[in-house]
Amino acid sequence: MPKLDREQALSVAALALLLLLCVSVVGLLLQARADAVREASERREILARLEAKLRTVSSRPTAAAPPAAFLDASTQGLASAQLQSYLAQLADDQRASLVSSGGEAGKRDDAPDTIRLQATLDMNLKALRAFLYQLESGTPYVFVDALTVQPAGATAGRAVEDPLLRITLSLRALWRRGTP
């Protein structure tokens, strides 16, 4: 067997190192590919579960509001008048006095079928509770966006336990365009 000189030995060692480096790079690439395949498989499984959940949720029947939940008028002005009339009737049922009511400017993020109203009423606390319950649980659906309560001016002759209150409400309701 011929003897290798120093130059040949260095060349063989460099070749062996180069071969070892190539084998380790190929091993690392195969490992990275296996990790990517496993992660893609996990994500596909998660996506399949989410799609199955979406199918079960979307197949459920959705509850629609009854027609009585909306103000039914041909214009927004008539719908606002209906809301004012409804509010006056509720106030009368609770023996409250409706001091003032009027349309309120819509907000920028309001849907076009939104009616806004601001109202001021005088009533006691018991009447206020019943009024708010009727307002928010009855139909049409009316939402209280803001409520301010202050003592009314003169409380002479009234019991301290049952003072007269001045209530300012900011209300919102939805309307559907009815036939003219």
Image: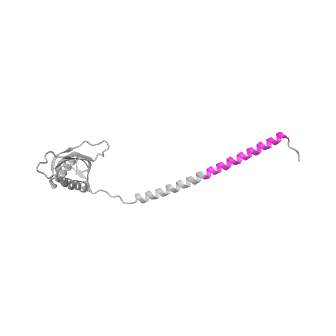
Horizontal and vertical percent position of residue 169:
22, 47
Is residue 27 shown in magenta?
Answer: yes
Looking at this rendering, what residue extends furthest in the top direction? 7
Determine which quarter of the picture holds residue 15.
top right
Q: Which percent across, then down, holds residue 130?
A: 20, 56
* 170 lies left or right of 52: left
Q: In the depicted view, which residue is nearer to us: 134 or 82?
A: 134
Picture mark count:
0
* Prevailing SS of the magenta stretch: helix
Highlighted range, magenta: 5-34
Query: Where, by quadrant of the figure, is residue 3 drawn?
Result: top right
| Residue 31 x, y percent position in the rendering | 64, 51
Name the foreground residue: 137 vs 83: 137
Query: Looking at the image, is 62 positioned above or below residue 165?
Result: below
The answer to whether one can see residue 174 in this image is no
> What residue appears at the point 50 percent right and 57 percent down from the top-left corner?
48
**In the displayed structure, does residue 74 sit left or right of residue 109?**
left
Q: Position of residue 2 (x, y in %)?
A: 88, 45
Q: Which of 168 and 89 is in front in this view?
A: 168
